[in-house]
Amino acid sequence: MTPALKLERRIIIISTAFVIVLFGLAAMAINLFHVGLPTCLTDIKPFQKGEFIAHSPTHYEVHYVAKMWDFEPAEVVVPAGSTVDVYVSTPDVTHGLILLGTNLNLMVVPGVVNYARVKFDKPHNYQLLCHEYCGTGHERMAANLRVVDAVTFAAQKTPPTPGPPAQNDAMVKLLEAKDCMTCHSIDGSDGIGPTLKGIYGRKTKLTNGSTITVDEAYLREAIVNPSATVVTGFDDVMPKPELTDEEVNALIDYLKNLK
Ligand code: CUA
């Protein structure tokens, strides 16, 4: 064999060994460190509602909704040793989702759903952050993912927070559409009218001299026929809103739970 052939053979052997080592490392990363491919786009339709689904005691699914400026659900609890499928969607602008201390790092792009699978071996409190600048509230856009031991997980009676029901968003939209929010806040501050936050069960003095506790009947009257019951300290300026019966019922349900 000529020296040139010898050299060629050596090069072939070394490069083949290199490729084998490379595949070996990739296999090790997948099996030992659970490194997946987090860039997978799915063909799932974007969703509006944060969700936590338990498939089995060791397999969970989380639907994160990233929106200006929080994640829904804000807290997820899973037992150690479980595999979690994470799907993320956004109704507004581009966000990012990173789970510090893990390989979970996804872009959150309007119109598509991104997916990644994570396996959690040990109990730990993980922080979920938005890593794409998305406006003035970007830096406070965070959530928690707690991995707890099986005993703690079994002990927690309350199911993981599924986030505020989607109905709330619809109701806020309705309140905005009917111009209610011009005078009534839902954050506890009084405006031209009293705040709607915590209205249900509130002891309220009316301009007719009576004091009532806000109940369903009062809410209905106050929505449908505002002039009949005016709260002391406010003017009788509320117009009759144009609402269907279903909308009135839904609003009452919403206000009952607006604590
Ligand atoms: Cu969302 Cu930054």
Image: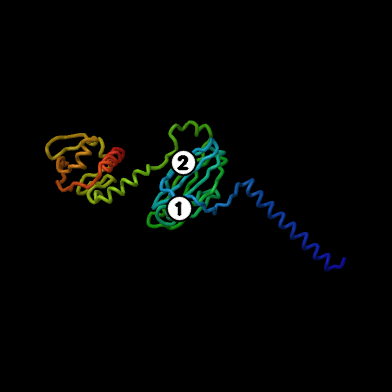
* Disc 1 residue lies near ligand 1 with CB under 8 A: yes
In the displayed structure, would residue 163 be above or below residue 157? below
Rendering quadrant holding ligand 1: bottom left
Query: Quarter of the image holding residue 246?
Result: top left
Q: Nearer the viewer, residue 229 or 119?
A: 229
Given residues 191 and 89, the one toward you in this image is: 89
Q: Nearer the viewer, mark 1 or mark 2?
A: 2
Q: Residues within 10 Å of mark 1 (few under 14, many from 20)?
A: many
Look at mark 2 in the image and give the residue it sits on: 52
Sequence-first tag of 1 and 2 = 2
Please tell me the numbered disc located at residue 195.
none
**Of the residues shown, which amino acid type is indicated by label 2?**
Phe
Residue 29 visible here: yes
The crowding category of the residue bearing disc 2, from other C-alpha atoms within 10 Å (few below 14, some 14 to 19, many at least 20), is many
Disc 2 secondary structure class = strand
Q: Is residue 56 above or below residue 31?
A: above
Pick the front one: 216 or 150: 216
Q: Residue at x 64, y 46 (%)?
A: 31
